[in-house]
Image (cartoon, rainbow, N blue to C red):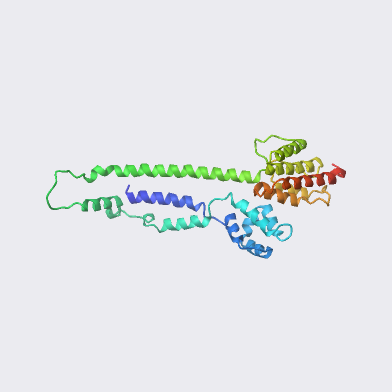
Amino acid sequence: MSGARIAKLASSFSFAILVAFAMGDTYRDLAKALEPANTAAEVKRISASFGDLISQEEAVSEAFDDVGGSYSVQEVKGLVAIRAAGEAPKADQAKSQIKSIKASPLYADPGVQEESNWLDGAMKRIMDLFPKNGPRSNVNLPQAPVLGWIVPAIWVLLAAIILLFGYFAIRHFSWKLGLTRKAKAMLEDDEPERTLDEWLSLADQHLAEGRFREAVRAMYLSCLLKFDEAGIARFIRGETNWEHLARIQTSSKKPSTIDFRPPTQAFDRIWYGYHVKGREDVEQFRSWYQEITETLRGVKK
């Protein structure tokens, strides 16, 4: 097989891989488009161009629908930024690389002519460097057949590159899946089941140790277990905070005076967005928990 065909195989392989990254809008595109937006009207105008992407996730769709009301412009931007963190590199970059590969002369069919073999051409140019006339030295110059190891070496190098690419691709997708899981799950798979009292005690422990973000999470989970205890919405450890909120808000047993949206928004900002003020965050969640407890005293299961 000629060297040009070898190079074409490598280009075709890269082209096939890059196609997988060049499909559809992404949260990275949406986040970049929202950067200059300062008003709810601008956010709604921009979101119209990303309707298919936004409609794929209920929490995101709800935030864009209610921007300027229950959600501020910054909260919507923060929610999009969290989703963008777990995505693959921007699709436009992959598209640009695809065009570059397709435009390469190596991607075209080199035909069967001898001149198309770049290895032969390279050897001819090397041999032309030596004078054909004049005194001969005692040194015997190597002939072209001696360099026949180049083609097998290129095959070995190409195989090594493909294996290395596959290794990093697997690592990339493993990291992405791990990031998506962390961004959605409030409880780790190996985290033990805890009672309401155990979560409250854990919140006090985290607060005493200065781990305010973890204390906020423990208090938020205590609120969810309180709703479960009152029969309003069952606590499901595999669901996200927004999925729990949706079931709580639509429960027929929920008192009309309870609005659990502000605590959920605050939890999303503190736990997933790492925007921690300190002890005051924990005290705010403790106050919400006490209000929920007082309101639910008269609710029948």
Say which of 291 and 65 sits in front: 291
Percent coordinates x, y for residue 46 in the rendering = 63, 63
Percent coordinates x, y for residue 166 in the rendering = 47, 43
Q: Residue furthest left?
A: 135
Q: In the figure, residue 239 lies in which quadrant? A: top right
Q: Residue at x 44, y 43 (%)?
A: 164
Q: Is residue 169 left or right of residue 70?
A: left
Percent coordinates x, y for residue 60 in the rendering = 67, 54
Say which of 127 and 113 sits in front: 127
Q: Is residue 110 left or right of residue 56?
A: left
Q: Is residue 141 left or right of residue 154?
A: left
Say which of 135 and 20 sits in front: 135
Position of the C terminus, as image quadrant, is: top right
Q: Residue at x 87, y 44 (%)?
A: 298
Q: Is residue 196 shown above or below 255?
A: above
Q: Residue at x 29, y 50 (%)?
A: 119
Percent coordinates x, y for residue 98 in the rendering = 46, 56
Q: In the figure, residue 156 lies in which quadrant? A: top left
Residue 26 seen in the current view: no
Q: How many marks?
A: 0
Q: Residue at x 73, y 47 (%)?
A: 280
Residue 216 seen in the current view: yes
